Image: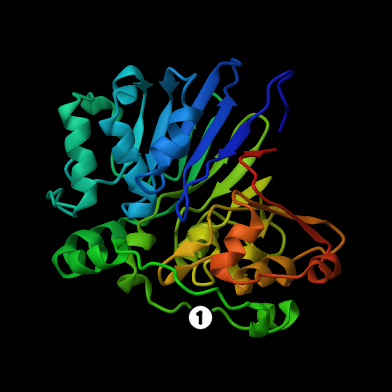
Amino acid sequence: MNIISNLQTKLHILKAYHGDCLLIRTFNLDEQPFTILIDGGPSTTFNFALRNALKDDCVIDLMILTHIDSDHIGGLISFAENSRFAEMDIKKIWVNCANLVPIGPNGELITYGQGVVLEKWLIDRNVPKHIFSERVTTNMRNECSNGICFEILSPTPAILNAVTENWPELSQEYKDKMAALPITNDAPSQIKKGTMTDLAKIAFRASSSVSSDLFNAMSIAFVLRTPDLSILLLADSRPEVIKESLVALGYNETHNRLKVDYVKVSHHGSKNNTSIEVLDMVESYNFIFSTNGGSGRSKHPDRETIARLLYHPKRDLNKRIKLYFNYPLSEITATSGLLFTAEELKMANAEYFDDICLVP
Protein backbone atom coordinates (compact mmCIF):
# COMPACT_ATOMS: atom_id res chain seq x y z
CA MET A 1 0.00 0.00 0.00
CA ASN A 2 1.50 3.34 -1.05
CA ILE A 3 2.04 6.02 1.57
CA ILE A 4 0.98 9.52 0.58
CA SER A 5 3.79 11.93 1.41
CA ASN A 6 3.54 13.94 4.63
CA LEU A 7 0.36 12.15 5.66
CA GLN A 8 0.03 9.38 8.21
CA THR A 9 -2.85 7.54 9.82
CA LYS A 10 -2.98 7.99 13.59
CA LEU A 11 -4.84 5.63 15.91
CA HIS A 12 -5.71 7.24 19.24
CA ILE A 13 -6.51 4.66 21.96
CA LEU A 14 -8.29 6.79 24.51
CA LYS A 15 -8.28 5.96 28.20
CA ALA A 16 -11.75 4.43 28.48
CA TYR A 17 -11.40 2.65 31.82
CA HIS A 18 -12.57 -0.96 31.23
CA GLY A 19 -14.13 -0.10 27.85
CA ASP A 20 -13.24 0.89 24.29
CA CYS A 21 -12.95 4.35 22.72
CA LEU A 22 -10.83 4.71 19.59
CA LEU A 23 -10.30 7.77 17.43
CA ILE A 24 -8.72 7.23 14.02
CA ARG A 25 -7.44 10.16 11.99
CA THR A 26 -6.58 9.13 8.45
CA PHE A 27 -6.96 10.50 4.91
CA ASN A 28 -8.39 9.53 1.53
CA LEU A 29 -6.79 9.37 -1.89
CA ASP A 30 -7.46 13.08 -2.37
CA GLU A 31 -5.34 13.72 0.74
CA GLN A 32 -8.41 14.96 2.59
CA PRO A 33 -8.71 14.13 6.31
CA PHE A 34 -11.07 11.34 7.37
CA THR A 35 -11.93 10.90 11.06
CA ILE A 36 -13.47 7.75 12.57
CA LEU A 37 -14.78 7.48 16.14
CA ILE A 38 -15.29 3.91 17.37
CA ASP A 39 -17.28 3.52 20.61
CA GLY A 40 -17.29 5.88 23.57
CA GLY A 41 -16.29 3.75 26.55
CA PRO A 42 -18.36 3.97 29.75
CA SER A 43 -20.20 7.23 30.44
CA THR A 44 -17.33 8.98 32.26
CA THR A 45 -15.00 8.55 29.26
CA PHE A 46 -16.45 11.58 27.48
CA ASN A 47 -15.49 14.12 30.13
CA PHE A 48 -12.30 12.28 31.05
CA ALA A 49 -10.83 11.74 27.59
CA LEU A 50 -13.08 12.03 24.54
CA ARG A 51 -14.11 15.68 24.97
CA ASN A 52 -10.49 16.81 24.93
CA ALA A 53 -9.57 14.48 22.06
CA LEU A 54 -12.28 16.10 19.93
CA LYS A 55 -11.60 19.70 20.99
CA ASP A 56 -10.09 20.69 17.63
CA ASP A 57 -12.47 18.64 15.47
CA CYS A 58 -15.42 19.95 13.50
CA VAL A 59 -16.14 16.80 11.52
CA ILE A 60 -16.49 13.10 12.30
CA ASP A 61 -16.75 11.27 8.99
CA LEU A 62 -17.88 7.99 10.57
CA MET A 63 -19.04 7.26 14.12
CA ILE A 64 -19.36 3.56 14.98
CA LEU A 65 -21.10 2.02 17.97
CA THR A 66 -19.89 -1.57 17.74
CA HIS A 67 -22.49 -2.91 20.19
CA ILE A 68 -24.62 -1.84 23.12
CA ASP A 69 -22.63 -2.91 26.18
CA SER A 70 -22.34 -0.05 28.66
CA ASP A 71 -18.54 0.10 28.38
CA HIS A 72 -18.89 0.99 24.69
CA ILE A 73 -22.10 3.03 24.47
CA GLY A 74 -22.00 5.08 27.70
CA GLY A 75 -19.51 7.67 26.50
CA LEU A 76 -21.40 8.15 23.24
CA ILE A 77 -24.56 8.88 25.21
CA SER A 78 -22.61 11.46 27.24
CA PHE A 79 -21.29 12.89 23.96
CA ALA A 80 -24.83 13.12 22.55
CA GLU A 81 -25.99 14.90 25.73
CA ASN A 82 -23.21 17.49 25.46
CA SER A 83 -23.43 20.73 23.47
CA ARG A 84 -20.25 19.64 21.64
CA PHE A 85 -22.34 17.08 19.76
CA ALA A 86 -24.54 19.75 18.17
CA GLU A 87 -21.44 21.61 17.01
CA MET A 88 -20.02 18.54 15.27
CA ASP A 89 -20.70 17.62 11.66
CA ILE A 90 -21.17 13.84 11.78
CA LYS A 91 -21.32 12.48 8.25
CA LYS A 92 -22.25 8.85 8.88
CA ILE A 93 -23.16 6.61 11.81
CA TRP A 94 -22.90 2.83 12.01
CA VAL A 95 -25.14 1.66 14.82
CA ASN A 96 -27.30 -1.45 14.94
CA CYS A 97 -30.01 0.13 17.10
CA ALA A 98 -33.42 -1.13 16.11
CA ASN A 99 -35.35 2.13 16.09
CA LEU A 100 -32.83 3.72 13.74
CA VAL A 101 -32.25 0.80 11.38
CA PRO A 102 -34.33 -2.38 10.91
CA ILE A 103 -32.90 -5.34 12.80
CA GLY A 104 -35.41 -8.15 12.67
CA PRO A 105 -36.00 -10.44 9.69
CA ASN A 106 -39.17 -8.53 8.83
CA GLY A 107 -37.81 -5.14 9.76
CA GLU A 108 -39.72 -5.04 13.07
CA LEU A 109 -38.59 -2.57 15.70
CA ILE A 110 -37.45 -3.41 19.20
CA THR A 111 -36.19 -1.54 22.25
CA TYR A 112 -32.65 -1.85 23.53
CA GLY A 113 -32.29 -0.43 27.03
CA GLN A 114 -29.28 1.86 26.88
CA GLY A 115 -29.40 1.71 23.10
CA VAL A 116 -32.78 3.42 23.22
CA VAL A 117 -31.31 6.24 25.33
CA LEU A 118 -28.79 6.93 22.58
CA GLU A 119 -31.50 6.71 19.94
CA LYS A 120 -33.66 9.27 21.74
CA TRP A 121 -30.79 11.71 22.12
CA LEU A 122 -29.94 11.44 18.43
CA ILE A 123 -33.58 11.90 17.44
CA ASP A 124 -34.05 14.83 19.86
CA ARG A 125 -31.09 16.54 18.24
CA ASN A 126 -32.63 16.16 14.80
CA VAL A 127 -29.82 14.06 13.40
CA PRO A 128 -30.82 13.47 9.76
CA LYS A 129 -31.90 9.93 8.95
CA HIS A 130 -29.62 9.73 5.95
CA ILE A 131 -26.50 9.55 8.09
CA PHE A 132 -27.60 6.23 9.59
CA SER A 133 -26.53 3.20 7.62
CA GLU A 134 -28.58 0.17 6.88
CA ARG A 135 -27.95 -2.66 9.32
CA VAL A 136 -24.22 -3.31 9.47
CA THR A 137 -23.60 -7.02 8.93
CA THR A 138 -21.35 -9.32 6.96
CA ASN A 139 -23.74 -8.87 4.04
CA MET A 140 -22.03 -5.52 3.49
CA ARG A 141 -18.59 -7.18 3.22
CA ASN A 142 -16.55 -4.51 1.44
CA GLU A 143 -17.35 -0.83 1.91
CA CYS A 144 -14.88 1.41 0.11
CA SER A 145 -14.80 5.12 -0.60
CA ASN A 146 -11.85 6.90 -2.14
CA GLY A 147 -9.16 4.75 -0.54
CA ILE A 148 -10.91 4.16 2.81
CA CYS A 149 -12.03 0.53 2.91
CA PHE A 150 -13.92 -1.57 5.45
CA GLU A 151 -14.10 -5.36 5.31
CA ILE A 152 -16.99 -6.34 7.61
CA LEU A 153 -16.33 -9.53 9.60
CA SER A 154 -19.08 -9.34 12.25
CA PRO A 155 -21.99 -9.58 12.97
CA THR A 156 -23.84 -12.00 10.73
CA PRO A 157 -27.48 -11.24 9.82
CA ALA A 158 -28.49 -14.36 11.77
CA ILE A 159 -26.94 -13.02 14.97
CA LEU A 160 -28.75 -9.70 14.68
CA ASN A 161 -31.98 -11.56 14.03
CA ALA A 162 -31.35 -13.66 17.13
CA VAL A 163 -30.87 -10.51 19.20
CA THR A 164 -34.32 -9.41 18.10
CA GLU A 165 -35.94 -12.75 18.82
CA ASN A 166 -34.34 -13.19 22.23
CA TRP A 167 -34.44 -9.64 23.53
CA PRO A 168 -37.14 -10.05 26.25
CA GLU A 169 -35.30 -13.06 27.66
CA LEU A 170 -31.91 -11.34 27.60
CA SER A 171 -32.89 -7.88 28.80
CA GLN A 172 -32.30 -8.71 32.49
CA GLU A 173 -28.97 -10.30 31.59
CA TYR A 174 -28.01 -7.06 29.90
CA LYS A 175 -28.87 -5.12 33.06
CA ASP A 176 -26.78 -7.56 35.08
CA LYS A 177 -23.81 -7.06 32.77
CA MET A 178 -24.03 -3.31 33.29
CA ALA A 179 -23.72 -3.68 37.06
CA ALA A 180 -20.13 -3.44 38.30
CA LEU A 181 -19.01 -4.78 41.66
CA PRO A 182 -16.39 -2.81 43.66
CA ILE A 183 -12.86 -4.18 43.69
CA THR A 184 -11.68 -4.59 47.26
CA ASN A 185 -8.89 -7.18 47.15
CA ASP A 186 -5.51 -7.32 45.41
CA ALA A 187 -5.71 -9.33 42.23
CA PRO A 188 -3.91 -12.70 42.28
CA SER A 189 -1.10 -13.23 39.80
CA GLN A 190 -2.04 -14.96 36.54
CA ILE A 191 1.44 -16.50 36.25
CA LYS A 192 0.24 -19.55 38.17
CA LYS A 193 -2.07 -20.44 35.28
CA GLY A 194 0.90 -22.03 33.51
CA THR A 195 3.74 -21.25 31.15
CA MET A 196 3.09 -19.23 28.02
CA THR A 197 3.92 -22.15 25.75
CA ASP A 198 1.67 -24.54 27.66
CA LEU A 199 -1.25 -22.11 27.71
CA ALA A 200 -0.93 -21.55 23.96
CA LYS A 201 -1.35 -25.29 23.36
CA ILE A 202 -4.68 -25.54 25.19
CA ALA A 203 -7.57 -25.86 22.77
CA PHE A 204 -9.82 -22.81 22.61
CA ARG A 205 -13.05 -23.31 24.49
CA ALA A 206 -15.25 -20.29 25.17
CA SER A 207 -17.11 -20.16 28.47
CA SER A 208 -20.40 -19.54 26.69
CA SER A 209 -21.94 -20.25 23.31
CA VAL A 210 -22.47 -17.57 20.68
CA SER A 211 -26.24 -17.85 21.15
CA SER A 212 -25.93 -17.05 24.86
CA ASP A 213 -23.49 -14.18 24.27
CA LEU A 214 -25.40 -12.26 21.63
CA PHE A 215 -24.51 -8.77 22.81
CA ASN A 216 -20.82 -9.42 22.18
CA ALA A 217 -21.51 -11.53 19.09
CA MET A 218 -23.39 -8.62 17.51
CA SER A 219 -20.24 -6.46 17.64
CA ILE A 220 -19.36 -4.66 14.43
CA ALA A 221 -15.86 -5.89 13.60
CA PHE A 222 -13.97 -5.04 10.44
CA VAL A 223 -10.68 -4.54 8.63
CA LEU A 224 -9.98 -0.87 8.00
CA ARG A 225 -7.64 -0.10 5.13
CA THR A 226 -6.37 3.43 4.56
CA PRO A 227 -3.79 4.58 2.03
CA ASP A 228 -0.98 3.93 4.53
CA LEU A 229 -2.30 1.55 7.19
CA SER A 230 -4.46 -1.51 7.81
CA ILE A 231 -6.12 -2.31 11.15
CA LEU A 232 -8.22 -5.27 12.27
CA LEU A 233 -10.73 -3.79 14.74
CA LEU A 234 -12.47 -6.58 16.62
CA ALA A 235 -14.60 -4.72 19.22
CA ASP A 236 -15.93 -7.48 21.55
CA SER A 237 -16.61 -9.90 18.71
CA ARG A 238 -16.68 -13.67 18.97
CA PRO A 239 -13.81 -15.58 17.31
CA GLU A 240 -16.23 -18.15 15.91
CA VAL A 241 -17.94 -15.41 13.90
CA ILE A 242 -14.64 -13.87 12.80
CA LYS A 243 -13.25 -17.22 11.68
CA GLU A 244 -16.37 -17.93 9.63
CA SER A 245 -16.10 -14.54 7.93
CA LEU A 246 -12.40 -14.88 7.19
CA VAL A 247 -12.96 -18.27 5.60
CA ALA A 248 -15.86 -16.90 3.54
CA LEU A 249 -13.57 -14.12 2.30
CA GLY A 250 -10.97 -16.65 1.15
CA TYR A 251 -8.44 -16.26 3.95
CA ASN A 252 -6.73 -19.30 5.42
CA GLU A 253 -3.78 -20.24 7.62
CA THR A 254 -1.45 -21.29 4.81
CA HIS A 255 -1.13 -19.29 1.60
CA ASN A 256 -3.60 -16.43 2.13
CA ARG A 257 -3.44 -15.05 5.65
CA LEU A 258 -5.03 -11.68 6.41
CA LYS A 259 -2.12 -9.24 6.68
CA VAL A 260 -2.70 -6.12 8.78
CA ASP A 261 -0.44 -3.62 10.47
CA TYR A 262 -2.35 -3.61 13.76
CA VAL A 263 -4.95 -5.69 15.58
CA LYS A 264 -7.17 -4.22 18.26
CA VAL A 265 -7.64 -7.35 20.38
CA SER A 266 -11.24 -8.43 20.99
CA HIS A 267 -13.04 -7.83 24.30
CA HIS A 268 -10.12 -6.18 26.11
CA GLY A 269 -8.05 -9.37 25.81
CA SER A 270 -10.55 -11.87 27.20
CA LYS A 271 -9.52 -15.48 26.65
CA ASN A 272 -13.05 -16.16 25.40
CA ASN A 273 -12.68 -13.86 22.40
CA THR A 274 -9.28 -14.71 20.88
CA SER A 275 -8.73 -18.15 19.40
CA ILE A 276 -5.71 -19.88 17.90
CA GLU A 277 -7.76 -20.55 14.76
CA VAL A 278 -8.29 -16.85 14.09
CA LEU A 279 -4.70 -15.91 14.96
CA ASP A 280 -3.36 -18.50 12.54
CA MET A 281 -5.29 -16.79 9.73
CA VAL A 282 -4.05 -13.30 10.64
CA GLU A 283 -0.51 -12.03 10.12
CA SER A 284 0.27 -9.08 12.36
CA TYR A 285 2.89 -8.22 14.95
CA ASN A 286 1.22 -5.27 16.66
CA PHE A 287 -1.61 -5.91 19.13
CA ILE A 288 -3.60 -3.26 20.97
CA PHE A 289 -5.37 -3.78 24.31
CA SER A 290 -7.98 -1.27 25.46
CA THR A 291 -8.55 -1.80 29.20
CA ASN A 292 -7.67 -0.52 32.64
CA GLY A 293 -7.77 -4.06 33.98
CA GLY A 294 -11.53 -4.42 34.10
CA SER A 295 -14.11 -4.07 36.82
CA GLY A 296 -16.16 -6.30 39.07
CA ARG A 297 -16.11 -9.88 37.86
CA SER A 298 -14.76 -8.96 34.43
CA LYS A 299 -11.00 -8.59 34.73
CA HIS A 300 -8.94 -8.24 31.55
CA PRO A 301 -6.76 -9.13 29.79
CA ASP A 302 -6.21 -12.85 30.30
CA ARG A 303 -2.76 -14.43 30.30
CA GLU A 304 -4.12 -17.10 27.95
CA THR A 305 -4.80 -14.47 25.28
CA ILE A 306 -1.26 -13.12 25.44
CA ALA A 307 0.09 -16.67 25.29
CA ARG A 308 -1.89 -17.31 22.10
CA LEU A 309 -0.62 -14.10 20.52
CA LEU A 310 2.97 -15.02 21.30
CA TYR A 311 2.93 -18.74 20.52
CA HIS A 312 0.15 -19.65 18.09
CA PRO A 313 1.41 -22.17 15.49
CA LYS A 314 1.78 -19.64 12.65
CA ARG A 315 3.74 -17.13 14.75
CA ASP A 316 7.12 -16.26 13.24
CA LEU A 317 9.40 -16.04 16.29
CA ASN A 318 12.00 -14.18 14.24
CA LYS A 319 9.66 -11.19 14.02
CA ARG A 320 9.18 -9.09 17.13
CA ILE A 321 5.68 -8.75 18.57
CA LYS A 322 4.63 -5.46 20.14
CA LEU A 323 1.85 -5.29 22.73
CA TYR A 324 0.23 -1.89 23.26
CA PHE A 325 -1.74 -1.05 26.42
CA ASN A 326 -3.61 2.24 26.80
CA TYR A 327 -3.19 2.27 30.60
CA PRO A 328 -0.06 1.85 32.74
CA LEU A 329 0.64 -1.87 33.05
CA SER A 330 0.93 -1.49 36.82
CA GLU A 331 -2.63 -0.16 36.94
CA ILE A 332 -3.92 -2.94 34.70
CA THR A 333 -2.26 -5.74 36.67
CA ALA A 334 -3.46 -4.31 39.98
CA THR A 335 -6.88 -5.50 38.83
CA SER A 336 -6.14 -8.31 36.37
CA GLY A 337 -3.15 -9.81 38.20
CA LEU A 338 0.40 -10.19 36.87
CA LEU A 339 0.19 -11.10 33.18
CA PHE A 340 3.78 -11.89 32.17
CA THR A 341 7.37 -11.46 33.24
CA ALA A 342 10.16 -9.62 31.45
CA GLU A 343 11.93 -12.92 30.87
CA GLU A 344 8.83 -14.42 29.23
CA LEU A 345 8.61 -11.53 26.79
CA LYS A 346 12.32 -11.82 26.02
CA MET A 347 11.97 -15.53 25.30
CA ALA A 348 9.01 -14.83 22.99
CA ASN A 349 10.78 -11.99 21.14
CA ALA A 350 8.14 -9.53 22.31
CA GLU A 351 7.94 -6.16 24.03
CA TYR A 352 5.19 -4.02 25.49
CA PHE A 353 4.35 -0.33 25.51
CA ASP A 354 1.99 0.94 28.18
CA ASP A 355 0.08 4.15 28.88
CA ILE A 356 -0.09 4.56 25.10
CA CYS A 357 -2.82 6.71 23.55
CA LEU A 358 -1.44 7.04 20.03
CA VAL A 359 -0.02 4.52 17.55
CA PRO A 360 2.05 4.41 15.47
Q: Quadrant of the C terminus?
A: top right
How far across and how far down the image is residue 284, in percent?
Answer: 70, 53
How far across and how far down the image is residue 238, in percent?
Answer: 45, 64
Residue toward you, 356 or 239: 356
User: Residue 156 sits in which quadrant?
Assistant: bottom left
Question: In the picture provided, is 121 more to the left or to the right than 191?
Answer: left
Indicate whether 156 appears above or below 205. Answer: above
The image's colouring method is rainbow
- Residue appearing at x 18%, y 23% in the figure: 126
Question: In the picture provided, is 21 more to the left or to the right than 204?
Answer: left
Q: Residues within 10 Å of mark 1 (few under 14, many from 20)?
A: few
Indicate whether 79 appears above or below 254. Answer: above
Per the image, the residue denoted by label 1 is 205
Q: How many marks?
A: 1
Indicate whether 204 appears above or below 55. Answer: below
- Residue appearing at x 81%, y 63% in the figure: 316
Question: In the picture provided, is 80 more to the left or to the right than 230?
Answer: left
Q: Quadrant of the N terminus?
A: top right
How far across and how far down the image is residue 66, in percent?
Answer: 39, 48
- Mark 1 belongs to which amino acid? Arg
State the SS at label 1: loop
Does the image show residue 266?
A: yes
Does the image show residue 136?
A: no
How far across and how far down the image is residue 39, in percent?
Answer: 41, 43
- Residue appearing at x 63%, y 41% in the figure: 230
Residue that extends furthest to the front in the rendered view of this protein: 184
Indicate whether 167 appears above or below 220. Answer: below
